Image: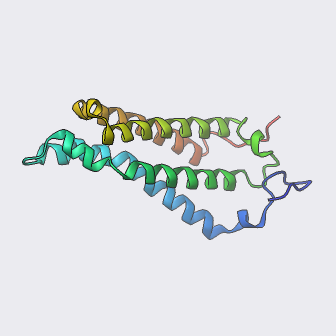
């Protein structure tokens, strides 16, 4: 991407590919729903209906690999969606994060890191597995907060403006 006089950092032909925008948003939303939905399913469906497996075994099985995959996909599609949202804004890349929109995106990324750290610890740490039901509730709560923040971005509640 090159710096253009009129469009700023985001003046690029690939940012104008509409099908890529749609696919990126669909993958992002699907992955976010998975990130938020898995703790609900594990806590309220799998654990109560498990026959012989302990809660620790169930949580360890569910949280062994997928949190890292989800983190990479969410971060990648989120960054791509951020670039699409800012295309034509005239902002520099760093300047884009100094807007209300950018600060909200940074907050969502921080929540993603917290969710991923807790998820990874649920898969690896026996102390976390011992209190798995509480940590699953924490994951659900943080996920819902991130979902609310994301919905304000996509519904226009937080507008994108040129940074100063």
User: Horizontal and vertical percent for residue 123?
Assistant: 31, 42
User: Horizontal and vertical percent for residue 105?
Assistant: 60, 40
User: Horizontal and vertical percent for residue 39?
Assistant: 30, 43
Residue at horizontal 44 percent and vertical 49 percent from the top: 68
Instruction: Check the image and name the residue furthest to the right.
Output: 5
In this figure, what is the number of numbered marks?
A: 0
Residue at horizontal 67 percent and vertical 39 percent from the top: 102
Q: Quadrant of the C terminus?
A: top right
**Does 103 sit above or below residue 76?**
above
Quarter of the figure with residue 81:
bottom right
- Image colouring: rainbow
**Does 37 sit above or below residue 115?**
below
Q: Tell me: 109 left or right of 70.
A: right
Residue at horizontal 72 percent and vertical 62 percent from the top: 15
**Does 56 sit above or below residue 75?**
above
Quick one: 154 or 109, which is closer to the camera?
Answer: 109
Q: Tell me: 84 left or right of 65.
A: right
Q: Tell me: 35 left or right of 91.
A: left
Q: Quadrant of the N terminus?
A: bottom right
Residue at horizontal 46 percent and vertical 35 percent from the top: 114
User: Horizontal and vertical percent for residue 128?
Assistant: 29, 32
Quarter of the figure with residue 56:
top left
**Does 12 sit above or below residue 160?**
below
């Amino acid at each position: 991407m090159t710096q253009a006089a009129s469009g700023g950092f985001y003046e690029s032909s690939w940012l104008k590919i509409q099908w890529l925008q749609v696919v990126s948003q669909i993958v992002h939303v699907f992955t976010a729903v998975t990130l938020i939905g898995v703790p609900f399913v594990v806590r309220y469906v799998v654990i109560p209906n498990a026959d012989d497996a302990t809660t620790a075994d169930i949580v360890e099985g569910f949280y062994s690999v997928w949190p890292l995959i989800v983190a990479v996909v969410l971060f990648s599609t989120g960054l791509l969606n951020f670039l699409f949202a800012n295309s034509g804004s005239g902002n520099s890349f760093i300047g884009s994060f100094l807007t209300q929109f950018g600060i909200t995106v940074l907050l969502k990324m921080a929540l993603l890191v917290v969710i991923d750290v807790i998820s990874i610890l649920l898969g690896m740490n026996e102390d976390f597995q011992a209190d798995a039901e509480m940590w699953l509730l924490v994951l659900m709560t943080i996920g819902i907060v991130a979902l609310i923040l994301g919905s304000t971005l996509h519904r226009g509640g937080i507008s994108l403006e040129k940074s100063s």
